[in-house]
């Protein structure tokens, strides 16, 4: 990859070059909506999944712990279903708000990078002030979702905004922006539990810590696509920090994530299926590390996107254990 002048023409109809060709935004969405949907990364849903899964995991873990203690009533299950829907809506709009805010902050850098110069702000599809207004709009929708929960959860959700605000600036100052991203992006691993218990505990703390390690790992893989441009622009990342030692670092981060998730499962009284899911996840992590080629952008992107299956695997294990735990009743 190299740097480009912002005066060069943009690919037809404002298509973003690093989005999958033929995605639903480019083919189905109304033309007037497309620049803003692209700004929200609606053409690349992987980020929504990676933001949403920690919420769903934590919610299910919290219900499992409740089943072990006081047992579950039908109202708890309906609350779980409704909360899952709210988290899905919240993940979509807040991921969009975060991406739009990040693009606003990085607009001058994005204009100089081949992979990002066709994004809506540097390409002129969306003006910076309009992008900020879009951030506010999406954030208000997110707030409307958040206030559906208990007061503890509301304040806990609001507490994440400081991390969200500072994250885009971190790559200017530290080789560890992925750590700040992990702290911000996985806040749902705390919020899901709080939605059930109106408080926190050791189990969601371990889940959250494991998710942070997971995010550092998968975003390091993602960042290897841009490391040459980042170096030329004076930006930093764990991809640059780890360099040729990326694979050992990833192995350690993934192993730590699995260990911390297992600890959370023990504390929440998981039965069997969660641990089986973690075995599958460990195997998938091993595949990511052993097949990764950090000099191949397509290879990095496919490994990054494969983390969606980590989310589904752990969710399936947790839901299966919740079903078993619910049928057993309180201990």
Image (spheres, rainbow, N blue to C red):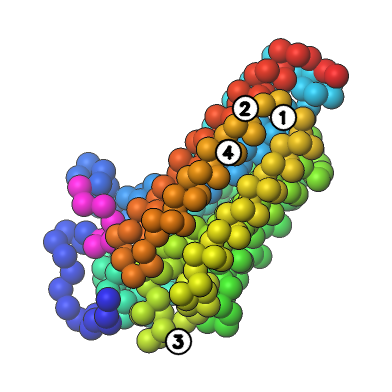
- Check disc 3 and report the residue beneath it: 234
Q: Is residue 296 left or right of residue 45?
A: left
The overriding secondary structure of the stretch rendered in magenta is loop
The magenta segment is 16-22
- In the image, 248 versus 131, the foreground residue is 248
Residue 246 in the image, given as x and y percentages of width and height: 49, 68
Residue 149 in the image, given as x and y percentages of width and height: 69, 37
User: Which of the two discs, 3 and 4, labels the residue nearer the N terminus?
Assistant: 3
Q: Are the two marked residues, 3 and 2, in contact with CB atoms closer than 8 angstroms?
A: no
Residue 322 in the image, given as x and y percentages of width and height: 67, 23
Q: Are the two marked residues, 1 and 2, in contact with CB atoms closer than 8 angstroms?
A: yes
Q: Quadrant of residue 28?
A: top left
- Check disc 2 and report the residue beneath it: 273
- Check disc 1 and report the residue beneath it: 270
Label 1 to label 2: alpha-carbon separation? 8 Å
> Residue 279's mark?
4
Q: Residues within 10 Å of mark 3 (few under 14, many from 20)?
A: few
- Position of residue 274 relative to residue 145, above or below, is above
């Amino acid at each position: 990859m190299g740097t480009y002048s912002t005066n060069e023409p943009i690919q037809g109809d404002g298509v973003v070059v690093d989005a999958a060709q033929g995605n639903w935004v480019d083919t189905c969405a109304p033309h007037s909506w497309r620049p803003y949907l692209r700004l929200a990364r609606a053409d690349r849903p992987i980020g929504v999944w990676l933001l949403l899964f920690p919420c769903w995991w934590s919610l299910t873990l919290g219900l499992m712990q409740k089943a072990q203690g006081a047992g579950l009533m039908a109202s708890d299950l309906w609350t779980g279903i409704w909360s899952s829907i709210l988290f899905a809506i919240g993940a979509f709009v807040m991921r969009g708000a975060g991406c739009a805010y990040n693009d606003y902050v990085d607009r001058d850098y994005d204009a100089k990078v081949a992979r990002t110069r066709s994004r809506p702000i540097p390409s002129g599809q969306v003006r910076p002030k309009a992008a900020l207004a879009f951030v506010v709009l999406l954030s208000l929708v997110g707030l409307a979702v958040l206030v559906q929960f208990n007061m503890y959860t509301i304040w806990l959700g609001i507490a994440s905004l400081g991390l969200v605000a500072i994250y885009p600036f971190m790559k200017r100052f530290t080789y560890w922006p992925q750590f700040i991203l992990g702290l911000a992006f996985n806040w749902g691993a705390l919020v899901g539990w709080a939605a059930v218990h109106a408080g926190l505990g050791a189990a969601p703390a371990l889940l959250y810590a494991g998710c942070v390690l997971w995010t550092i790992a998968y975003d390091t893989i993602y960042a290897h696509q841009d490391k040459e441009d980042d170096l030329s622009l004076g930006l930093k990342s764990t991809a640059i920090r780890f360099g040729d030692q990326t694979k050992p670092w990833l192995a350690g981060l993934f192993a730590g994530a699995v260990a911390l998730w297992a600890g959370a499962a023990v504390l929440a009284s998981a039965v069997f299926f969660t641990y089986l899911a973690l075995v599958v996840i460990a195997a998938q992590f091993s595949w990511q590390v052993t097949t990764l080629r950090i000099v191949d952008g397509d290879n990095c992107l496919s490994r990054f996107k494969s983390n969606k299956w980590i989310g589904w695997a752990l969710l399936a294990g947790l839901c299966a254990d919740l079903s078993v735990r619910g049928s057993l009743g309180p201990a």
